[in-house]
Image: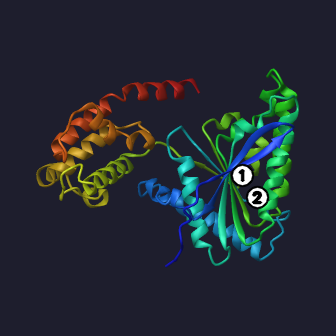
């Protein structure tokens, strides 16, 4: 049991003056924060995928173990860098927020507080030639200042890391290849220096791993694919949405929605006759095949947008509206399938 107090302060922008150009290079949030209170639990995997969360937690546990026992990182390499990759909307950034939140609680006896720095990658690309590499150095210089406090557990989140760590070979074909290469070189150099900081963890996400420089990929200790949710995960996601709407009295109370593991051993006939509402929701999940978690959690809202439902709505009316909202997502499925085939 871990007792903790949630920080309620707003996130702060880290502003610097770059020769008269005011830039925000990162957003900083003290952990554990009320802002990320539900992030870890909101990402749902089925039983076959649940070890993803366990692996991420063990990653930190092992990093702390090796650091406390002063294992030489030049002999046994540990960069404390993890990369989550996969299609958009699968919850990669949310997992990073939730992981940082959870670790700041789990290691509260070792570290007095946590802090997450979310890098504003667009601010690091200056309009002035050759300035972007210098901006990366300024970012990491600020990071080192924060990490000087050994009682702080520091997380660095780089969303869409391919914008910083673009493959240098492909950058040679760009309009300004030298500046792009300087950015990558600066990032790699700073990451190598950061390895000496046992209280810093770097988390990166990407939708386009083929665009990331191999030198960055080789530095990531863990490269974890996060894909669209499976049918069991889709069911649990939609069920959690329904539970929330029932709790807020927007949908009438439902007493026969089973957890997925409870119904998995039942035959279709038994499930349909004994638990018809569970059967209805399961069929809706089949219609959602290919949709990402971000869209799944939006569907109940869209159900009320597209259909004028009474409040509280009956479950049957809600499911009918939900299925209609799902049918409206076909364009999203088409775009995703087209993008995948082109890649």
The crowding category of the residue bearing disc 2, from other C-alpha atoms within 10 Å (few below 14, some 14 to 19, many at least 20), is many
Residue appearing at x 71%, y 36% in the figure: 122
Question: Is residue 164 at all visible to an observer of this figure?
Answer: no
Total numbered labels:
2
- Tell me the number on the disc at residue 220: 1
Q: Report the colour scheme.
A: rainbow
Name the residue rendered at 61%, 54% in the picture: 11
Disc number placed over residue 79 in the picture, else none: 2
Q: Where does the C terminus fall, quadrant-wise? A: top right
Q: In the rendered image of this protein, does residue 34 appear above or below residue 83?
A: below
Mark 1 and mark 2: Cα distance apart in space: 7 Å
Judge by depth and name the residue closer to the eye, 237 or 232: 237
Residue 237: horizontal and vertical position, in percent? 37, 50
> Where residue 208 is drawn, which disc sits there?
none
Residue closest to the far front? 20
Q: Nearer the viewer, residue 146 or 221?
A: 146
Q: Residues within 10 Å of mark 1 (few under 14, many from 20)?
A: some
Mark 1 / mark 2, whichever is N-terminal: 2
Q: Quadrant of residue 8?
A: bottom right
**Callout 2 secondary element:** loop
| Helix, strand or loop at mark 1 | loop
Q: Decide if residue 286 is on the left or right side of residue 70.
A: left
Query: Percent x, y for residue 165?
Result: 75, 39
For the point 31% across and 60% down, the residue is 261
Contact between labelled residues 2 and 1, with CB atoms less than 8 Å apart: yes
Q: Quadrant of residue 135?
A: top right
Quadrant position of residue 248: bottom left
Q: Position of residue 303 (x, y in %)?
A: 28, 37
Does residue 329 appear left or right of residue 175 in this picture?
A: left
Query: Can residue 333 be spotted in the picture?
Result: yes
């Amino acid at each position: 049991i871990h007792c903790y107090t949630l920080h309620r302060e707003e996130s702060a922008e880290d502003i610097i003056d770059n020769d008269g150009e005011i830039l925000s290079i990162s957003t900083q949030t003290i952990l554990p924060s009320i802002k990320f209170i539900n992030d870890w639990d909101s990402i749902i995997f089925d039983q076959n995928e649940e070890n993803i969360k366990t692996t991420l937690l063990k990653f930190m546990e092992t990093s702390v173990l090796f650091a406390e026992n002063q294992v030489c990182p030049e002999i046994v390499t540990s960069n404390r860098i993890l990369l989550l990759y996969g299609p958009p909307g699968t919850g990669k950034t949310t997992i990073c927020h939730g992981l940082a939140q959870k670790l700041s609680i789990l290691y509260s006896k070792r570290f007095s507080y946590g802090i997450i720095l979310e890098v504003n990658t667009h601010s690091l690309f200056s309009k002035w030639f050759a300035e972007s590499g210098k901006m990366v150095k300024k970012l990491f210089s600020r990071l080192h200042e924060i990490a000087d406090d050994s009682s702080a557990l520091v997380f660095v989140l780089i969303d869409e890391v391919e914008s910083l760590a673009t493959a240098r070979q492909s950058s040679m074909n760009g309009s300004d290849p030298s500046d792009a290469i300087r950015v990558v070189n600066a990032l790699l150099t700073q990451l190598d220096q950061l390895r000496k900081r046992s209280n810093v963890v770097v988390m990166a996400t990407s939708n386009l791993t083929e665009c990331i420089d191999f030198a960055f990929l080789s530095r990531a200790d863990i490269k974890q694919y996060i894909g669209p949710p499976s049918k069991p995960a889709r069911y649990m996601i939609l069920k959690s949405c329904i539970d929330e709407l029932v709790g807020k009295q927007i949908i009438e109370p439902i007493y026969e929605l089973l957890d997925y593991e409870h119904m998995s051993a039942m035959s279709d006939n038994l499930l349909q006759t004994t638990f018809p509402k569970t059967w209805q929701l399961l069929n809706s999940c089949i219609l959602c095949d290919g949709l990402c978690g971000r869209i799944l959690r939006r569907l109940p809202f869209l159900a009320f947008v597209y259909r004028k439902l009474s409040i509280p709505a009956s479950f049957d009316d809600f499911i009918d509206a939900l299925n209609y909202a799902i049918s409206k997502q076909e364009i999203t499925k088409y775009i995703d399938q087209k993008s995948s085939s082109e890649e």
